Image (cartoon, helix red, strand yellow):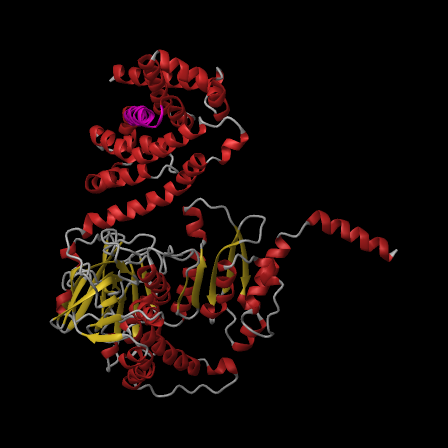
Amino acid sequence: MRRYINMRFLVVAVVLLLVTAYFTTGVGSYLTLVSLKQNQELLTAQFSSHPLLVSLIFGAGYVLVTALSIPGATILTLASGAIFGLFYGTIIASVSSTIGATLSFLGARYLFRQSVEHRFRERMASINQGLKKEGSFYLFTLRLIPAFPFFLVNLVMGLTNFSVWRFFLVSQIGMLPGTFVYVNAGTEISKIESLKGILSPGLLISFSLLGILPLLSKWLIGYFRSRKHLRKFRKPSKFDYNMVVIGGGSAGLVSAYIASAVKAKVALIEKHKMGGDCLNTGCVPSKALIRSSKIFNYFRRANQFGLEPMVPKLQFSKVMERVQKVIREIEPHDSVERYSSLGVECITGEAQILSPYEVKVNGQVLTTKNIVVATGARPLVPKIPGLELVKPLTSDNIWNLREQPKKLVVLGGGPIGCELAQSFARLGTDVTLIEMSNRIMAREDVDVSTLVTESFQKEGVHVLTSHKALRIESASGLTRLICEKDGKEIAIEFDQILLALGRRANVTGFGLEELGVEISQRGTVVADDFLRTTNFPNIYVCGDVTGPYQFTHTAAHQAWYVAVNALFSPFKSFKVDYRVIPWCTFSDPEVARVGLNEIEAKEKGIEYQVTKYGIDDLDRAIADGEAHGFVKVLTVPGADKILGVTIVGHHAGDIIAEYVTAMKYGLGLNKILGTIHIYPTLSEANKYAAGIWKRQNAPQFALKILGKFHSWRRN
C-alpha cells in the first residue's frame, strides 16, 4: 500500500514538473499561429530531410500536450496539416491525440478513481451502470463535437470503469471528423503568403467547415441516435397522421389543439374522460369543494364582519353534487365536440403503441410521424398492512362520497392532503392530518408551514407530524390507524382514510415497456431538453407522465414545446424552459411560490437577501378580514434581481402573477415599486414589499449628503 502511495506521489510530481516546465520555459510561445507561420518553411524542410524522425518527435510532442491537458492541441492539429499535408497530417494528429487522450484517461483513473469511488459509491455505481449500456454512444457524441473540452472527457471518463480499449477505439473514431477539418484548415493556412491569401476559396471553405462542424456534429448525433433505435422498425412510406396524442388531459389537449391550429392532422386518444384528472378528479372538483367550505366557514365567522352568527344547515350530499355540477359546466371546454370542431380527430378507446410509427386503438392501426404520450398520473397507494380492510379514499374516488365522514384520517401533508383536510374540517368532519416528516408542506420554508399549521389547528384540524403509518387494524366495529412516533405506537380511530401521498406516472399497459422506453427511478418517462424520449426521437412526452412538475399549467407549458418540436423538427426545435414555474396550494391561507425559497437557495449554495412584508399591515386585507400572511422575496444581495417569491395569504395565487411576469422578463423590484397599483387591492402587497427592499438597500451615504443639502437650503 505504501509503495502504491509513493508511486502516485511520483506520478503527480512528474506531471507537475512537466506542466511547470511548459509554462516557465516559454514552450507555449511556440504553440501559436504566428509561430507556426514563422517556422513553417523550416519545419517543412526538416520533414523533407528526416520524415520519420520529425514525425516521431511531432507525434510525441502532441501526445505529451494532450496527456497533460495543457493548451496547444488545436495549434498542433493545424500544424500537422501545414507540415505533413492533409492525408498524412490527419493520421499523425488523429493517432497522437487518441494516444494522449488515453494516457490522460489512465492517469485520472490511477490517481483519483479509487478515492472518488469510495466517496461517491452510490452515484458512481449508477454512472457506471449507465455507461455499461450507453457509454460508447455517449463518448462518441462528446468526441464528435470539437467545441466540447476534450481534456474534461478524458479526465471524467477515467474516473469510471469504462474499458480502456473501448475508450481508445471510440475516441479514435469520434475525433476523426473534427481532426480532419482542423488539419484541412492547417493545410490552407500554410498556403497564405500575403493578406490577399486570407480571401482564397480554399481557406474560406476550411473556416466555413470549422463553423459548420458543430452543427453538422449535432445533426449526426441526432441521426445516429435515431437510427440506433428506429432501425428495428419498418417505417411506413406515408403516414395517416402528423401526430397521435395519447391522453386527453391538459397536456394532451393543448398539444392536439396546437397541432390542429397549424393545420397538422392529429388524432387524440382518450380511454376514459376528456379533461383528464384536472377536470374530473383534481383541480376543478377540489377548488369547488374548497369554495363551498370557505363560504360555510364565513358563516361561522359572521361576528367578525359585524353580523349575527347563523350557521346554515349543512347537507353534505348537496355540497358534493355542486362539485359535480361545476365539473359539468366546465366539461364543454374539454369535450370531444369542441376539439372535433377544432379539427382534432378524437377517439375514445385504449391506445397501444406497437412501434414508434404505429398506434393501435379499437382494432385499428394508426400510422403517425410522431407520438405524444400524455397519459398523466394516478394517486400513489402505499402497501400498508391492513389497508385491504377498508376502502381507502384517494383524489380519484373521494368525489363519489355522498355521506359525510365523521372521522377522517388524511395521510400526507402535501398540497392535496392540506387542501382536502381543511375543507372537510370546515364542513364539520373530525379530521386528523398525518405527516411522516416533521412538518406539513415540507417543500416550503419553515415560516410558511408554521403559519399554515397554526391556521389548521385553530380550525380544529389535528395535525400530527413525525408520525409514520404502520398498519390498519379493525376490531369490534372500530377501525384504527396505528402510527409510530418516537418509538411509541399511537392509535387513531377513523371511518374513512384519504391517501394523499403523491402521484405515480402512468407508464405501463400501453406499449412503452415493450418498446424499451427509458423510465427514471422516479417512475416517470425520461425525456431530453426537447421533451423527446431518450430512445425514440419521434416519441414525445408531456405532463405528469414525465414531470418534473406535476401541475396542470406546467403540463400545458410542456405541450406547446412538444407540439412545435414534433411538427417542425428538424427545421426548428425549442428546449423546454423551466426557469419560471409558479405554483399554489389552495389552502386558507393560500401558499403561492415562484423560483427559489430559502431552503432551495441554501441547498444550492446561492447567496440571497430576504425582504419580507407582513400582509397584516395591508389596508385591503384588513378591510376583508383576511389580515394574515406575508410576501417574502429573495433577491441577489445588493441588487433588485428577483430569485424567488413566496406569498402566504388570501388570494396568494392571484397576487403572485406580477412576480411571475417580472421574473420571466427580467424585471426587478425597482420596476414593481415604480408600477401604479390600484388602491385598495391585495396586489399592493407587492409594491410594499418592493418598498421595504428599497429602504433596506438605500444608499446611506447619498442620503446623508442629501440631508445636509436640504439643511443648507433651509438656512
Q: Quadrant of the C terminus?
A: bottom right
- The answer to which quarter of the image holds residue 341 is bottom left
Residue 118, can we see it?
Answer: no
In the image: residue 149, left or right of residue 383:
right
- From the top left corner, tell me how far across and down residue 491 is, in percent: 22, 63
In the image: residue 432, left or right of residue 300:
left
Image position of 53 with respect to 600: above or below: above
Pick the residue in front: 381 or 229: 229
Would you say the magenta stretch is mainly helix, strand or loop?
Answer: helix
Residue 204, can we see it?
Answer: yes
- From the top left corner, tell me how far across and down residue 591 is, in percent: 43, 65
The stretch drawn in magenta includes residue 502: no
Pick the residue in front: 511 or 7: 511
x 59%, y 70%: residue: 677
- The answer to which quarter of the image holds residue 575 is bottom left
- From the top left corner, tell me how far across and down residue 456 is, in percent: 38, 68
Pick the residue in front: 619 or 310: 619
Q: Which residues are magenta?
A: 85-107
x 52%, y 61%: residue: 662
- From the top left corner, tell me how far across and down residue 670 is, in percent: 61, 58
